[in-house]
Image: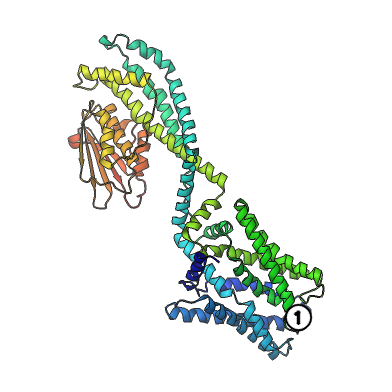
């Protein structure tokens, strides 16, 4: 047994759940009928049948009372640390109490059990030897996993996402999506290209047709950007853990246990020995046959060791190898012993159906308990790695691919809407003369910008990590020649809870709307933290105030993404212009309050 595993075992035994009995009643209700069948109590017509069942049941009640008393003592003693040895002794003592009560009750009813009471007490000690250690592992595993579940799942999700990017799949998907978008953009401007080029032949006369720019921006480009945005919103997102008190954590622990490395074989051998002893001693007046017991234990050890090598050699088949090796190692030694020694005292060949069913149920229940208990004896790093493997790889890859497609689609939708559409519509507004105070140099700049968009390559800006203020300035920079921009921000540190790139898209959209729809010459951007610690933003322009009459568009969706509906359009000061008011919650999202439409 490795030092790290020994340390984790000791931590589990000495932990705050070492003698927590919350799952013990359920376990005893499951194990009691199985034990009755294995012990051969199947003759319902026997006159003493009910008395034997009652005596055994009272023994189990005494066992539970003993364990419950230990738990109460332990809790009232401020949960002192226990060693594995002391827990084994306490667990075995419970078995002594159980069979002592069962035998004494049977004698009180006039029954005469075979063997002395001392023999049954020794049998009870070994048969219950591992109950409390396994209970400690089980409770520790379930409760600690529930407490850390959300964080563990998120870290495993992050690990999968990193692996997805590192192996190049994310980049390949991004290229496929971008190639498709660029191809569609190029196709969409083919018909507009010829008319646009002919309209700017005589640059000195500024003969460009603003209606051509408006038609292309508001038609083909708008259609493509909205399609990409809808595609991004329809894709799945990272998995959100279910409520921690549901059965899902148990299922996840089961999948996790099948992926975690095997526990030391000696632990399994101790459990096997405590189960094999009562079977070997069934219906016998003589002491346990030592040679039969030794044969079974040696066979079990080598079969489990061989299974562990397979487990390590083929980790991709771990969920199948783990239960299979336990079933084979439990059953095969008994059948080998029956072949070598048909007179073995634990039954005849073939075994009764009830015995086989009970044995199968016992193995299944023990495998289940051990599997969901394994998380208690492994480190956090090993659990995260196993969680990463436990999710169906193909399903996880498809989900990550869908998330990547959504991310790229959203970036391109914002680029087309906030950059291409807005710049073309701004150029059209300048050339139409609808914006006052625009000189000839600005008109030439507008033509150059329109020419770049209509003739150059479509290329979305690469994602760059910028500070909060740098992102605002970066998004405002392209508009400084068309509209006067004032920025008032009372803090410079980055809000950790705020997605900077999404807020940059809001700034870009607000400026574009003020110029395109409101025909404004000035916009004031005010950003502050309010008394609740939330981000409160006001984008106030001096335009004609027509933004609120625009049909719902991608701009509304951009605002909704970051503000969750906590935004509105209202008249500016003294009824001049428009004010976009937005509150971005910092700690928890408010219910959506709706928002005005903006294109």
Residue closest to the far left: 574
Mark 1 burial class by Cα count in 10 Å: few <14, some 14-19, many 20+: some
Between 498 and 46, the residue placed more toward the observer is 498
Is 56 situated left or right of 466 in this image? right
Residue at 29%, 34% (x, y): give it: 475
Quarter of the image with the N terminus in it: bottom right
Q: Is residue 294 above or below residue 503?
A: below
Hey, which quadrant is residue 289 in on the image?
bottom right
Residue at 51%, 51% (x, y): give it: 388
- Measured as percent of width and height from the top left, residue 43 is found at 77, 77
Q: Is residue 139 above or below residue 189?
A: below
Camera sees residue 428: no
Quarter of the image with the C terminus in it: top left
Between 266 and 211, the residue placed more toward the observer is 266
- Measured as percent of width and height from the top left, residue 175 is found at 47, 32
Q: In this view, does 498 lie above or below 7?
A: above
Hey, which quadrant is residue 322 in on the image?
bottom right
Q: Is mark 1 on a helix, strand or loop?
A: loop
Residue that badge 1 annotates: 283
Is 577 situated left or right of 378 in this image? left
């Amino acid at each position: 047994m490795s030092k790290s595993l020994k340390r984790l075992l000791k931590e589990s035994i000495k932990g705050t759940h070492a003698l927590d009995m919350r799952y013990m009643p359920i376990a005893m209700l499951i194990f009691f009928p199985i034990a009755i069948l294995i012990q051969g109590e199947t003759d319902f017509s026997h006159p003493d049948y009910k008395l034997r069942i009652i005596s055994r049941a009272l023994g189990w009640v005494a066992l539970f009372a003993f364990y419950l008393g230990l738990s109460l003592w332990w809790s009232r003693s401020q949960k002192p640390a226990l060693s594995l040895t002391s827990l084994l002794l306490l667990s075995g003592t419970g078995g002594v109490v159980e069979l002592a009560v069962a035998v004494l009750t049977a004698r009180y009813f006039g029954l005469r059990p075979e063997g002395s009471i001392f023999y049954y007490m020794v049998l009870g000690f070994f048969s219950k030897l591992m109950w409390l250690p396994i209970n400690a592992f089980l409770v520790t595993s379930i409760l600690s996993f529930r407490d850390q579940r959300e964080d563990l799942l998120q870290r495993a999700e992050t690990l999968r996402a990193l692996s997805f990017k590192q192996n190049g799949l994310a980049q390949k998907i991004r290229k496929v999506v971008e190639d498709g978008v660029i191809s569609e953009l190029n196709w969409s401007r083919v018909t507009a290209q010829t008319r646009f080029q002919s309209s700017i032949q005589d640059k000195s006369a500024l003969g460009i047709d603003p209606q051509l720019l408006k038609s292309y921006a508001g038609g083909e480009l708008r259609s493509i950007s909205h399609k990409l945005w809808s595609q991004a919103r329809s894709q799945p997102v990272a998995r959100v853990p279910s409520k921690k008190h549901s059965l899902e954590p148990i299922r996840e622990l089961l999948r996790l246990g099948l992926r975690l490395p095997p526990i030391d074989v000696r632990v399994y051998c101790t459990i096997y020995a405590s189960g094999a002893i009562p079977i070997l001693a069934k219906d016998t007046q003589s002491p346990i046959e030592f040679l039969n017991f030794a044969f079974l234990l040696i066979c079990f050890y080598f079969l489990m060791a061989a299974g562990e090598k397979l487990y390590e050699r083929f980790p991709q088949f771990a969920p199948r190898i783990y239960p299979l090796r336990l079933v084979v190692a439990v059953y095969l030694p008994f059948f080998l012993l029956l072949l070598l020694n048909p007179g073995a005292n634990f039954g005849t060949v073939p075994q009764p159906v009830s015995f086989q069913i009970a044995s199968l149920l016992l193995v299944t229940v023990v495998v289940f308990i051990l599997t969901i208990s394994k998380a208690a004896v492994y480190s956090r790093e090993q659990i995260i790695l196993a969680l990463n493997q436990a999710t169906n790889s193909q399903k996880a890859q498809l989900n990550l691919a869908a998330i990547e497609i959504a991310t790229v689609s959203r970036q391109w939708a914002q680029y087309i809407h906030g950059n291409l559409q807005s710049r073309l519509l701004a150029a059209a507004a300048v050339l139409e003369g609808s914006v006052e105070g625009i000189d000839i140099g600005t008109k030439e700049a507008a033509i150059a910008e329109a020419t770049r968009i209509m003739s150059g390559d479509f290329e979305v800006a690469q994602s760059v990590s910028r500070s909060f203020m740098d992102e605002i300035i970066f998004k405002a920079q392209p508009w400084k020649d068309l509209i006067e921009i004032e920025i008032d921000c009372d803090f410079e540190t980055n809000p950790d809870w705020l997605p900077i790139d999404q807020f940059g898209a809001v700034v870009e959209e607000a400026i574009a709307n003020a110029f395109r729809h409101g025909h404004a010459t000035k916009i004031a951007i005010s950003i502050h933290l309010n008394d609740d610690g939330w981000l409160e933003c006001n984008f106030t322009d001096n335009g004609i105030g027509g933004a609120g009459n625009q049909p719902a568009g991608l701009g509304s969706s951009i605002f909704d993404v970051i503000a969750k509906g906590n935004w509105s359009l209202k008249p500016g000061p003294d009824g001049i212009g428009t004010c976009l008011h937005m509150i971005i919650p910092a700690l928890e999202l408010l219910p959506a309050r709706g928002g005005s439409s903006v294109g």
